Image: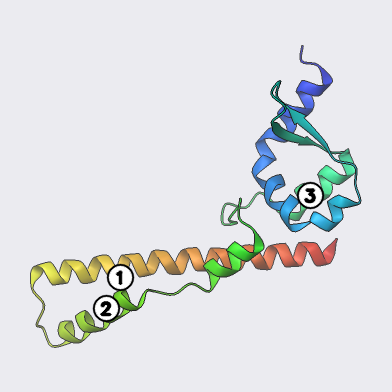
Amino acid sequence: MPSKTELSISILWPTSIYIILLLRITHAFLMSQQVQYVTNPAGERLGVLLDLETYQNLVNLVPNDEEILTGMSVEELQALAESELSIKAQNKLNDLLVRNKENELSLEETTSLDNLLVQIDQLNIIKTRARYTLHKLQNKIKAS
């Protein structure tokens, strides 16, 4: 039978990603709370022990939502949400699109255009997820 400390650690571990993110975002909130760290024999921090109310407040800030990006600061999320295609890639895309419209692309260039469009789609998806995460965090912080 695990001790109360081992049980507390195992309960916190699955949500550690959320807690790390939320510790950054709610720094001021946590500074007013007593925070205890779980350490290994070398003194390295492995986890955080919080009173139940603080833990529930943190967990409720970010629901179990697969679209939310975790482990990133607000600044990192903002940078990601505002990221753009590099100038080099944008110039290549423009050239390929013009030449494609005129049916002047080789098979290799068509493949290159397709790959670039897939990358742009992925960039747009991750940017949208970053904006979604920021929106959810801002709404939860306002509500608490």
Residue count near mark 3 (Cα–Cα under 10 Å), binned few <14, some 14–19, many ≥20: many
Q: Position of residue 53 (x, y in %)?
A: 89, 44
Of callouts 1 and 2, the N-terminal one:
2
Report helix, strand or loop for mark 3.
helix
Q: Position of residue 94 (x, y in %)?
A: 26, 83
Q: What amino acid type should be assigned to the residue bearing mark 3? A: Leu
Which residue does the image show at 59% across and 64% down from the upper left? 77
Quarter of the image where one finds residue 48: top right
Quarter of the image where one finds residue 87: bottom left
User: Whole-Å distance between the Cαs marked 1 and 3?
Assistant: 38 Å
User: In front here: 39 or 89?
Assistant: 39
Quarter of the image where one finds residue 76: bottom right
Q: Residue beneath label 1, please?
A: 117
Residue count near mark 2 (Cα–Cα under 10 Å), binned few <14, some 14–19, many ≥20: some
Q: Residue beneath label 3, please?
A: 58
Q: Position of residue 132 (x, y in %)?
A: 61, 66
User: Whole-Å distance between the Cαs marked 1 and 2?
Assistant: 8 Å
Q: Residue beneath label 2, please?
A: 93
Q: What amino acid type should be assigned to the residue bearing mark 2? A: Leu
From the viewer's perspective, is the residue at label 1 or at label 2 nearer? Answer: 2
Contact, CB < 8 Å: mark 1 with mark 2?
A: yes
Residue sitting at the far top: 1
Report helix, strand or loop for mark 2.
helix
